[in-house]
Structures are given as structure tokens and as C-alpha cells.
Amino acid sequence: MSSNIATDNKPNLAVEFAGLKLKTPLMPASGTFGYGQEFAPYLDLNQLGAIVTKGLSLNPKAGNPTPRIAETVSGMLNAIGLQNVGVDAFISEKMPFLEQFDSPVIVNFFGNTQEEYGEVAARLNDVPGVAALEMNISCPNVKHGGIVFGTDPKAAFDVITTVRKRLTKPLIVKLTPNVTDIRITARAAEDAGADAISLINTITGMSVDVRTRKPRIANVIGGLSGPGIRPIAVRMTHQVVQTVKIPVIGIGGIMRAEDALEFLIVGAKAVQVGTANFVDPNAMQTILADLENFCIEQGIEDINDLIGSLQL
Amino acid sequence: MSSNIATDNKPNLAVEFAGLKLKTPLMPASGTFGYGQEFAPYLDLNQLGAIVTKGLSLNPKAGNPTPRIAETVSGMLNAIGLQNVGVDAFISEKMPFLEQFDSPVIVNFFGNTQEEYGEVAARLNDVPGVAALEMNISCPNVKHGGIVFGTDPKAAFDVITTVRKRLTKPLIVKLTPNVTDIRITARAAEDAGADAISLINTITGMSVDVRTRKPRIANVIGGLSGPGIRPIAVRMTHQVVQTVKIPVIGIGGIMRAEDALEFLIVGAKAVQVGTANFVDPNAMQTILADLENFCIEQGIEDINDLIGSLQL
Amino acid sequence: MKNLQTIVLSNQEISPGYFRMRILAPGYKDIAKPGQFVMFRVRRSLPPLLRRPFGIFQIGLLPADCEGMPEKEFIELIYKVVGAGTEVMCELHEGDRIELLGPLGRGFDIDDEGGDKILVGGGIGLVPLYMLADSLADRSKTRLLIGGRSREDIITVTEFERLGVTSHVTTEDGSLGEEGLITRILERKLDKYPKAKVYSCGPMPMLRAVEVICSERNVPLQVSLEALMACGVGACLGCVVKGREHSEQNPEYLCTCRQGPVFHSYELDWERVEKNIEQEESS
Amino acid sequence: MKNLQTIVLSNQEISPGYFRMRILAPGYKDIAKPGQFVMFRVRRSLPPLLRRPFGIFQIGLLPADCEGMPEKEFIELIYKVVGAGTEVMCELHEGDRIELLGPLGRGFDIDDEGGDKILVGGGIGLVPLYMLADSLADRSKTRLLIGGRSREDIITVTEFERLGVTSHVTTEDGSLGEEGLITRILERKLDKYPKAKVYSCGPMPMLRAVEVICSERNVPLQVSLEALMACGVGACLGCVVKGREHSEQNPEYLCTCRQGPVFHSYELDWERVEKNIEQEESS
Ligand SMILES: Cc1cc2nc3c(=O)[nH]c(=O)nc-3n(C[C@H](O)[C@H](O)[C@H](O)COP(=O)(O)OP(=O)(O)OC[C@H]3O[C@@H](n4cnc5c(N)ncnc54)[C@H](O)[C@@H]3O)c2cc1C
Ligand SMILES: Cc1cc2nc3c(=O)[nH]c(=O)nc-3n(C[C@H](O)[C@H](O)[C@H](O)COP(=O)(O)OP(=O)(O)OC[C@H]3O[C@@H](n4cnc5c(N)ncnc54)[C@H](O)[C@@H]3O)c2cc1C
Ligand SMILES: Cc1cc2nc3c(=O)[nH]c(=O)nc-3n(C[C@H](O)[C@H](O)[C@H](O)COP(=O)(O)O)c2cc1C
Ligand SMILES: Cc1cc2nc3c(=O)[nH]c(=O)nc-3n(C[C@H](O)[C@H](O)[C@H](O)COP(=O)(O)O)c2cc1C
Ligand code: FES
Ligand code: FES
């Protein structure tokens, strides 16, 4: 598979899938990297495989009351409530900045109804600088009693089909881990025409301040992210890779290069780094350097040789 | 609710539910305390609210190949494979030791088929020293393609009904967290006649050794436990308490008294301590002492005043 | 604004539960402004996971180790031990490696006029006021009003006085200075100096009371807010407060880490800010 | 067998990557047996989560701090830095607080006869052999065979020699002693002392080779095994090895922590043990 001789040449870290060419398999996870601009002082955005933006909705969204975040053991809970500037303001105010970089821009989006999902996708489809869309299906379907789209395979299939019809750009569907069998939603996404799958979004969780006896997050329940959830994310990525033919992007608790490698080895074509960006705005640069070192040390000339190389 | 004056008298820690009288709301989680004997040198078993044994099956079970455990960030994966001595050997060899203590003995059990579940329950029903049974429904149903009983509300309802018919002792049903909506299985358990619910069992996870590219557990997938999963366990406990009328026992990542308090405040009548017993065989004694101190410090004379006192 | 891998120079308990940490911080002297803060991280791989925000108390220079070497720029933090993060911090020693992100946020807007200034601090909230006091044009016209629960909570006042600032102390238990709340003194001072500008940092109930007093009298007020922060750079949106123009249709959320932590009083929706922070205080 | 909250007395690098830690351990001297181990925990709240198992290298007494005080019992561990846990351990200093569970497990079965004894250690596997050597009746008839990859992996041999034991060293790269594997020496020695008893600890491939040699010659062998451990007390069943009688219908799983870590060779199902450990070695 790969020779054991360390090479002086830089290993190839570029990956290609779903019509996307990425310089490296590393990109930020939506909602942890703002609109890119916030990290520009700390990080060379041109080194990233892609830039993934905060999730956008049709109209600007206020988000939830505070406290919105709480630290847990090796993780954090958040209930930001998908606060965002709205798709139109994004296009006019944020895209000009992002277009300066040659890393592809992946725009994350969501809706409260099937129609809203379709409409946001359609508007983004016409924006030249946008390389692909990532569709967050972890949102409550307001027309169906608030059941989260991504927890109901039928609803997921329908909403992805609607989006697919209005989109010519590559479509990445981002799955929620709060399901009994992630393979079922993955298959629904593939069947509905997704070009790729990314996973996982946060796991719902709760934490209580035992002195005040109040939830530590105003919204009571929030999404758990960070290194503590990584084994769950790796397991789900493995299951989905074994199930669908479309490419998979792994997400969940990646802090170091070794963590990213777990996802790549089980078969993810690329990975996203979330909470680690908060802990260290340089995190992705460090991970990238260490990925390269790992390849050199292990005599891997092309990272694609490593992807899916799990020994069962 | 409770006066703010610290009291010199010891607070009441005893709780009662499902016909069980517990001296304290603290007990070990199944599979992390052996058959009790292993911890006797370190801990006064009479101080525990109950003694919960390793899960038993009809026949002795060999368990999985090694490696069976792997440490993860703030957690551990295990795939012990439910190795146990079998119900008959338990009754003849282990019960005599356990009967010496006045803490009620709760016996955890499982089966590969509905019939096996029923049969184990029936055998344990006749054993005098057994105070209650805890039924682990996180096992694959070998007759139905290996789908885990507890992830299918119908299968869960059926198997619990079968057990209920053969059992006069109190029945605690232990739920798996690997489901989309834990409230649905909780309701199925209540409808099938469970006297109490305990949750959560481990969350399925996976970890890869990036140098050998092999799963760090021979079984590939294992169960994640430990402090990292606590927010998920607290959230599910909260959801179940809000859904069913029967009492709930909270489990998941309890390391310290404050962790136990989170579960009690959201409404668990008692809690189980799992992985913490490995980290520190004295863990439950420390937690107990700190629970008492917390009550004194907060002027809580009766722990029952604290149970379910979440401020929403 | 960068992530500095650096070391602790000293870390001492200056009053029960309060520590003062000096950190090697090249590059801070020329750019850090009064009211800015840093995100502090204990060594990698140790909990807590997230960094913790701390105001910059002071910036200074130590003599070079030997001729030919540069002088050593340092910053000082003063922190109160309240939870997991500060508990780890207070065990750090000289030479321990840490990471520092900063200087971050918007500091105080300072005009150059030498008019009357009143700084109102509550407990540890006095931290950002020291650099502010130091930077004011006419310190003889600057008054520091500092309140706390008890004498242990009143720290570094003599250092303010050495800057030429007059100080007034109140404690709730009367163990130091006047007994009572600092806002009473603020009213007295504003009666005497009605044209003063007010700068304040401290717990929310105090800030709210200060705001009421200042807005009644039409006195300009800047406040430094605290919030739970994950990133410190405006990315997580965890630290928001509602702006004056905020409504559900037209959300105006301000990031404490980026648009703050110092705000002009008129930028904030005080009703809502207070309500939010009440939740935080009690949670 | 208890959980001791104690302190580190010293912690030094004795060869690149190998550390020797002395720990205050009252109560160990009278009860700990050669081959037993401890579960070591770095201070609460620090990762790693689980304790780590380490053999006891030596037990000793330090003079009392002053007259009237008791002598200080200590134990010594020798460990190789291989991962997260040992990386934290090697940064501990004198006086740092740690927790120790032990002494745990079954040690070596030692008969009192003064016959020939051969101790075969691979790398760090030599740790439990020191207390064993020390307890043997006639040390002039005891030979220590110790193998390693390179000269850095050969540690504490002079201390064995001070006990009166003869030592033979091999390294794979020939940088110390004979070049090659230690099993070659074992065969030579067994040719010479066919009635010797063998005791061994080291990596699985070595143990397996030792087992083959000994069973061919009908020489009694005790081995000390390693396994991943969560609890160390027989509760988690994470550390099992298959016993000689093991079958799916009639499982005979032995806990390395409780029935071991020292086993008589005949208790184990070597085919299966090797297969299991192969997985571990490579994973
Ligand atoms: C811009 C800014 C500047 C600050 N400057 C200083 C300073 O100079 N000195 C100082 O001692 N502290 C300062 N703080 C507060 C400091 O960040 C917290 O005390 C610290 O993060 C607590 O960490 P911990 O892990 O010890 O406590 P945790 O375990 O995280 O929390 C302990 C308790 O404190 C509460 N808490 C934690 N952080 C905050 C916060 N930011 N606001 C309100 N309540 C909180 C928690 O809800 C909890 O009840 C500042 C905060 C901000 C936002
Ligand atoms: C009874 C017993 C006695 C031991 N005595 C000693 C001793 O005296 N000196 C010493 O240096 N070590 C000894 N060990 C091994 C020691 O426990 C491990 O090296 C240590 O746990 C590694 O911890 P870590 O966190 O540094 O490495 P980890 O990060 O946990 O692991 C690093 C690598 O080592 C492997 N590994 C970890 N633990 C073991 C194990 N127990 N067996 C096999 N592979 C493992 C892992 O799979 C991984 O590849 C003993 C083990 C046992 C079971
Ligand atoms: C503060 C915060 C905000 C997030 N916002 C979004 C979002 O807008 N859209 C989305 O699809 N995922 C969002 N996520 C989920 C992350 O993209 C990622 O899936 C998750 O955090 C797991 O990765 P991590 O453990 O590396 O953080 C958010 C996560 C956090 C912590
Ligand atoms: C090694 C191990 C073995 C376990 N065996 C069982 C079992 O036999 N039956 C069962 O119902 N749960 C079993 N569990 C699950 C625990 O009882 C508990 O639900 C879970 O570990 C979560 O709690 P914790 O985070 O406190 O460990 C086991 C857990 C571990 C770590
Ligand atoms: S702390 Fe993240 S946006 Fe302010
Ligand atoms: S380590 Fe837990 S049973 Fe041996």
C-alpha cells in the first residue's frame, strides 16, 4: 500500500470528491468558525481544504437567550439557536471577504420548513464564489410539530429532495447523531441525491447547576461537542462509510492530528474541526502540520492511501 | 422548600420507590462492581443503597476476545461481551456472600431471546435474597436479525411483558441511549409493567489505533461510559422523568457528588455509579460523604426534598 | 491579537482567594488598551477544555536578563478562584508554560480631556480600571469608588492611589471603608461633580444600579461586561448581549468578546441585558 | 489491598525513556509479594481517567525524619514512557500527591528449595524479577537473563548483581552484551541446568518462545503477563486471558489482575493467549 521509507518530499494531502478539489482534508465545522473573518488574524485561510460558514437561514435569526454555552467534562454544550445574519446579508456582506481566498467556500444552511430549505439553497446556488452547500438537517420541522428533520428518514428524504431540485452545486447533507440507526438517514440522504454526507452534528445534552438547581443553558437542552464525543462520531462515520457509496466527511471532537486520522482511516474523505477552534484558533494549522509529519513518519506519500485503510 | 440553616443532625438520605427501601440513593452500576465481593476490601457494602450485580444470562457466557477495553478522552470503551457465570452459578456461588449484607441486592440480567429473558427472571424470582431485578434490554435479539431489543419499542414492550408475567419481584428496566427518542422506549417499558426505569446504558462508540490502523477493541464497536457522556445521560433522565410516572434511576458518568446531584435534581430517585468504581474503588463512599456534606451546607434535611427540584 | 505560547513569571495569593499572576507577554505593551482582555489556557491536554477570559490589570517591563537582551514585557492578571479553571490556575508556578490569546475586544473609549472621571468597581471588577486610571490625563480629578462584600474583596487600592487617584471604599459588612453599597458614594460624588464621566465594571446588579443613576443624571457611562465565553474572537456567539435596537425581527446581538467587553451604556438594551445576566448570575 | 493517598519521594530518568519512581507506601513492606503490582493514579481531575498498572520493583525503608517518628516505607516503580499516562507520570516531582491501589494480584509462587533458578526478562519486563531474585533462597544459583532492543533498554542489571545473581545480557542490535535474542541464552542455560525453574516477564513473543523452550524440556515456568486493565480488582473483566480449559461452552477466562499477573505456564491456553495478545501488541 505504501512504502515504509520516509520521504523528503512533502506527502500529498489533496483530496477530491463530490466535484470538490481540496488542498487538504481539513476544514472548519460550521458554527465554530464564524464567517471566516474572525479567524483570519490567527490562521492562513488559504491553507484550509475549504472554508465552512456558520449556518444560514432565509431570514436573519436572533438565536436563543443566554446563557448559551456551558463547559462539560471534555466537551461543551451550546444552544446558540442558529443565530445568523440571513442568506441575503451573507451574500452581500460576507462573501466578498471569503472570495479573496482560493480555498473553496462551503456554505452551511437550514430552514424551518421544507420550502425555506429550498429557497435558501436556490439563492445560494446563484452565488459564484460558493463551491458547495452543506445542509444542516438537525432542525425542527415547524410544520410537523417540531420533529427534527434529520431524525425522521422520510422527512429527511423529502427535504433533501426539495433542495436537490433547486441546486446544481454539490450538496453535502449533514446528519444528526440523535438517531437509533445513522445508516438509515445516511441512505435516505444518498437516495435523495446528496453528493456527500457530513457527520456528526452535536449530540443533545443537558447540565444542571446543582446549587441554583437550574439548567446551565437557558434553552435547557443544548448540543454536546468536543473530544468526549469522538468515539461516538468515529463509530457513526465508520457505519456510514460502510453503508453508502457517496463520500463522507467526518466531524466530532477532533483536537489533534491523531483524532483526524481516526476518521480518515475509517474512510472519511475529509474532516471538519469544530470546538477545537475555540480552544485554539491555530488548531487547524497545528493539525495540518502534524498530519504531514505523520505521513512522513509512516512513509505515506499520498493521504488517499490512508483513507479507508482500516484493518478489520 | 428547605430552610437555609445548616443542621447539625445528619440529613436523611433514605429513599423509597418501587417497593424498595434504600438507605441512600447511591448504588453501583451493573458490570462495574463484579458480584460485590471484589469491592468488599475497599468499601463497606452496607453503606450502599443497593448492590447491583454484573448482568446474568441463562447459561455462562464467555464474552468477547481481547482487547476488550480502551480509554478515550474522559471515558472508556468496553466490549466485555457480557461475560458472566450464568444464573445458576450466581445463585449457588455468589448469593451466599451477598446475603450477608443488609443492602438490598438488585440482580441485573439479560437474554438472547424473549424466552431466555423470561426464564432467567423466573429463576431469580425464587431466590430469597434478591430484592429486585434490573433488566438490561441493550442486547441483540438473535431471533430478529440481532436488532437490539431496546432500540425497537415493540420488541422492548414484548420482552418486558414476557418478563413481567414471570416475576413478582420489582422490575427495573434499564434503557439503552442508542435511540432517537428515549421517551418512546420509556413509555413502552411503563406500559409493559416495569416498576422503575434505569438509564443510561453505554453509548456505542469506536476508537482506532492510527498506527496499526486497527480498532482499539477486538469487537470493533464498544460501549462508551464515563464522565464525558454525563450531559447526554442527564438529558435523557430529564426527558424520561418528564414522560413516565414510574420512578427513574439515573446513570452515566457520575464521578463526584455534584454529578449525582444533577440526576437527583432532574428527578431521579436514585443513581448508579459505574466507571468511577474502576478509577477509585472508594468512589461511592466519597460521593456519599460529599452528598451528606452538600445537604448540610445547603440546609437540606431530607434528600427527597431535592429530588425533582429542577428550576425551569 | 495572537496566540502566545509563554510562561508564568509569578503567581501569588494577594488576598484570600485572589491571585495575581505575572506573565511574559512580548508585544502587548504597544497594542493593549485599557479594558481589553486575554483568553487564558492552561497547558494543553489539561482540563478545563475551554480558555477563560481575564482582564489585563497592568502591563510592564522587567529589566533584561543581561546586557544585549531585550527588556521583558509582562502583563498582570488578577483573578478570583471560583471554579475548575481558576483552581488549576492558582497552582501554576514560575516557569510553567501557558497560552494566551490577546489582547482581545474593545477597551474603554478615552477622551483626552482632563475633566472629572469616576471609576466604579465591584470586587474583582476593579481589574480593568487600573490601566484605565493610568491612562487618564488628569488623575487628580479621577476618583475610584470600590465596593465589595468584605475587606478581603478590596484589593490593590493602594496601587490606584499611587497613580494619584482618590479612592473611596465601601464594604457590605463594614469591615473596611464605609458600610453599604458603592452606589451611594457614586450618587454623592455625582452630586458634587455632575459633569463627571463614569466608567464601571463589576457584578450585574451593581452595573444596573450605576446605569440607573447615570441615566437619570444624563451622565455618560461606559461599562465592562462579563459573559461566558468559548472563543473570545466573535465566532461562537456564546457571549452575546442584546443591543438597544434588538428585536426578534431585527436581532441586534452584540458579542461581549468583540463589540465589548466595554460598551457605552447607550448601546445596550438594559432591560434585556439585566434579564439575561440575572439568568447567568443565578445559574 | 487498599487505596493509599500518598506522595512521590523521587522520580528520575534512569535511561532514555525509563523512569524510576519512589513512593511513600506505609503498609507495603509486610504484605507485598514478588510479582504483585499497583494501580497508579495521577492526581484526581487530571487525565488519564483510568489508573495504570505497574509492577513493584522494590520495597524499602528510609530512616525516620527524626527520632520518635517511624521509618518511612517506600516502594519503587520503574516505568517506560509509552503514552498519555506515563507522560503525565514522568513530570511528577517530589511531594506531588498521587493515589496507589495495591498490592494487587497473585505474585510468583516461590518454593524454598535452593535449586537452580533462571529469570528471563525482556526490557521493562525485568521489573517484577528483582523482588523475586531478592527472595530466592540461594542466589548464587540464580541467573538473570535479560534481553532488549538496544543498550538503553537494559536497566538495573548491576542491582541484580549486587544480590549475588549472575546476569547475561543480549541486545538485538548488539550494543550491549551478546547480539541476538535472550531465548538463545535460555536454551544454553537449560542445557547446562536441566532441572532449573524458570520465571519470565516481557513482551508476548518472548514469553511464547520461552514457553515453547520450557515445555519441550518439561521445565516448570511461571510467567507474568501484561494486559489492559481498567479496575485491577477483578470487576471489569477487561484483562482476561483464556485458561487451558477454555471453550465457548465452558468458558475459562482468567483475570490477569486477580488470578495473575503471574501464572504457571500450565494454567494458560498458550495458543489462545498468544492470539489475543497478538491483537493487543499490534493494536
Ligand atoms: C472580559 C472578561 C474579563 C474578565 N476578567 C476577570 C478578571 O480580571 N479577574 C477574574 O477573576 N475574573 C475575570 N473574569 C471572569 C472569569 O473569566 C471567570 O471567573 C472564570 O472564567 C471562571 O472560570 P472557572 O473555570 O474558575 O469557573 P467555572 O467553573 O467556569 O465557573 C464557576 C462559576 O462562575 C460562573 N462564571 C464563570 N465564568 C463567568 C463569567 N465570565 N461571567 C459570569 N459568571 C461566570 C459560572 O457560571 C459558575 O457559576 C472576566 C470575564 C470576562 C468575560
Ligand atoms: C501487571 C502489570 C504490570 C506492569 N508493570 C509495568 C512496569 O513495571 N513498568 C512499565 O513500564 N510498564 C508496566 N506495565 C505496563 C504499563 O501498565 C503500561 O505501559 C501503561 O499502562 C501505559 O500507560 P500509558 O497511558 O502511558 O499508555 P497508553 O496511552 O495507555 O498506551 C500506549 C500504548 O501502550 C499499549 N499498552 C498500554 N497498556 C498496556 C498493557 N498493560 N499491556 C500491553 N500494552 C499496553 C497501548 O495499547 C498503546 O499502544 C505493566 C502492566 C501490567 C498489566
Ligand atoms: C457553538 C457551536 C455552533 C454550531 N453551529 C452550527 C451550525 O450553525 N450549523 C451546523 O451544521 N452545525 C453547527 N455546529 C456543529 C458543529 O459544526 C459540529 O458538527 C459539532 O460541533 C461537532 O464537532 P466538534 O466536536 O469538533 O465541535 C455548531 C457547534 C458549536 C459548538
Ligand atoms: C466494563 C463495563 C461492563 C458493563 N456491564 C454491564 C452489564 O453487564 N449490564 C448492564 O446493564 N450494564 C453494564 N454496563 C453499563 C453500566 O452499568 C452503566 O450503565 C454505564 O457504564 C454508564 O455508567 P458510567 O458512565 O457511570 O460507567 C457496563 C459498563 C462497563 C464500563
Ligand atoms: S466568546 Fe465566542 S463569540 Fe464571544
Ligand atoms: S482489570 Fe478489571 S478485571 Fe482485571
Image (spheres, coloured by chain):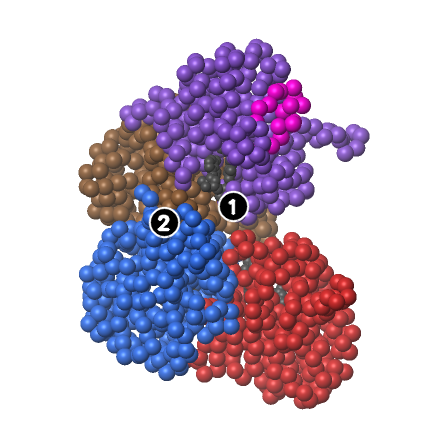
Chain colours: A blue, B brown, C red, D purple
Q: Is mark 2 on a helix, strand or loop?
A: loop
Q: In this view, does A216 lie above or below B305?
A: below
Kindly identify which residue carries mark 1. Answer: D84
Q: What residue appears at the point 77 percent right and 34 percent down from the top-left corner?
A: D65
Query: Which segment is the magenta one?
Result: D154-169
Could you say which quadrant of the image residue A199 lies in? Answer: bottom left
**Image spot of residue C45 (x, y percent):** 53, 53
Is residue C243 in view from this perspective? Answer: yes
Residue D54 is left or right of residue D74, and the answer is left
| Neighbourhood count class around disc 2 (C-alpha, 10 Å): few under 14, some 14–19, many 20 upward | few
Q: Which amino acid does label 2 sit on?
A: Ser
Quadrant that contains the C terminus of chain B: bottom left
Kindly identify which residue carries mark 2. Answer: A2
User: How far is mark 1 from mark 2, CA to CA?
Assistant: 28 Å
The answer to whether mark 1 and mark 2 are in CB contact below 8 A is no
Q: Does residue D157 belong to the magenta stretch?
A: yes
Is residue B45 in view from this perspective? Answer: no
Q: What residue appears at the point 63 percent right and 24 percent down from the top-left corner?
A: D160
| Neighbourhood count class around disc 1 (C-alpha, 10 Å): few under 14, some 14–19, many 20 upward | few
Q: What residue appears at the point 33 percent right and 58 percent down from the top-left corner?
A: A269
Q: Does residue C256 belong to the magenta stretch?
A: no
Please name whichever residue, B261 or B16, is drawn nearer the observer in this view of the structure.
B261
Q: What element carries label 1?
A: helix
Residue D200 is left or right of residue A58, and the answer is right
Q: Mark 2 lies on which chain?
A: A
Please name whichever residue, B183 or A3, is drawn nearer the observer in this view of the structure.
A3
Could you say which quadrant of the image residue D250 lies in? Answer: top left
Q: In this view, does C67 lie above or below A203?
A: below
* Mark 1 Cβ and ligand 2 under 8 Å apart: yes
Q: What residue appears at the point 54 percent right and 62 percent down from the top-left corner?
A: C51
**Image spot of residue C125 (x, y percent):** 64, 70
